[in-house]
Amino acid sequence: MSEPAFRCAGASLLRDEPVAGTASTVRAFLLLEEAGPWGVDALRDARLPDGLGVRLRAAAAASGVRILLVRRPGSRASAAPRRVLAAYADPDAPRLESGTVADPADVLDLDLAGLRAGGSAGLAPDPGTAFAVCTHGRHDACCAERGRPVAAALAQAHPEETWEVSHIGGDRFAGNMLVLPHGLYYGRLDPVAALTAAGAHLGGQLDLDHLRGRSGHPMPVQAAELALRRELAETRVDALRLVRRSADDGVTEAVFDVAGAAYAVRVRSTMRGSEQLTCRATRENPAVHHEVLGVRRT
């Protein structure tokens, strides 16, 4: 009898790997509707017009904007016109814009550099929220196996807000959800937990049990924010504001303002162990570990 296939999400859960401080560090996102299939590398392998994937990758690299492909859960039919979402995931002033394009190449005319700098990409302001669940199974099996049930459940409850999205990072924490425009990464979601997190967010609250971090902050600051929130039992989305941070010899100190009071959190970040971190990985790699050294009011 052959051994069961390796699954990175199950392995991460078995070794009790913390999710805090593991969100990808991204300040601006562009989401382009493409029903699929996406292949292993979405911009390279999806059935976009010839050469567009390469141009999108170059535009992303030049602007510092993360370009992702999205589709409605269960849909594999091409959409025309295609929806486009642009998000500035600033921790203090997040903003979402949306629109449509008849030709996917039209997204190259958007002001991606302006978006990354905090301005408009050239789309209409959108006061809504996007729940983007990674279901990119060709990139990592766990994303499909754990992400698709999450996306299906969210689509039933929040059809306008819910999207399937290509690889967002952290496959081993599947099911993963990116909430825009705030840039909140949630991990280890099942359908019930996803509905709870989505409902909490729409009510202005965070689900600390599944929150990986806020993409607008570096990973150590993400871990610091979560540690402080747990210390204060503070779940309001906008309750904490980063005042300053410093780093020295692997230790980060992040100072947050909470209702006019300042709190300092010290976090030591190290690379530990050597594990197969994704289902497709061909070698083992260390993973970041955040140790909270202290929380104090200043």
Image (cartoon, helix red, strand yellow):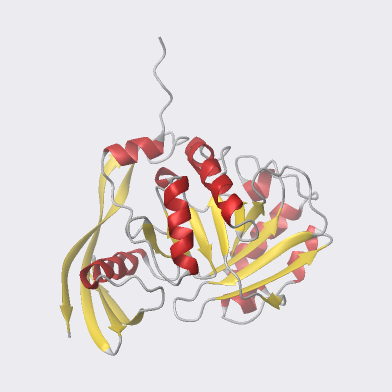
Q: Is residue 42 left or right of residue 271?
A: right
Q: Residue at x 70, y 64 (%)?
A: 84
Q: Is residue 121 above or below residue 293?
A: below
**Which residue: 53% across, 41% down?**
149
- The answer to whether one can see residue 25 in this image is no
- Which picture quadrant has residue 8? top left
x and y percentages locating residue 157 in the rendered image: 57, 54
Q: Position of residue 35 (x, y in %)?
A: 72, 47
Residue 73: x, y in percent? 64, 47
Q: Is 217 left, or right, of 58 in this rendering?
A: left
Residue occupying image coordinates x 31% and y 70%: 225
Task: Give the total of numbered labels.
Answer: 0
Q: Is residue 164 above or below residue 115?
A: above
Quadrant occupied by the C terminus: bottom left
Which is more toward the observer, 186 or 89? Answer: 186
Residue 129, given in percent of the width and then of the height, sits at: 57, 67
Residue at the far bottom in the pictured view: 260
Left or right of residue 206, residue 224 in this image: left
Q: Quadrant of the N terminus?
A: top left
Of residues 16 and 127, which is closer to you in this image?
Answer: 127
> What is the residue that sits farthest to the top in this orientation?
1
Instruction: Identify the residue shown where x is 60% and y is 51%.
Output: 155
The answer to whether residue 123 is visible is: yes
Q: Is residue 279 above or below residue 106?
A: above
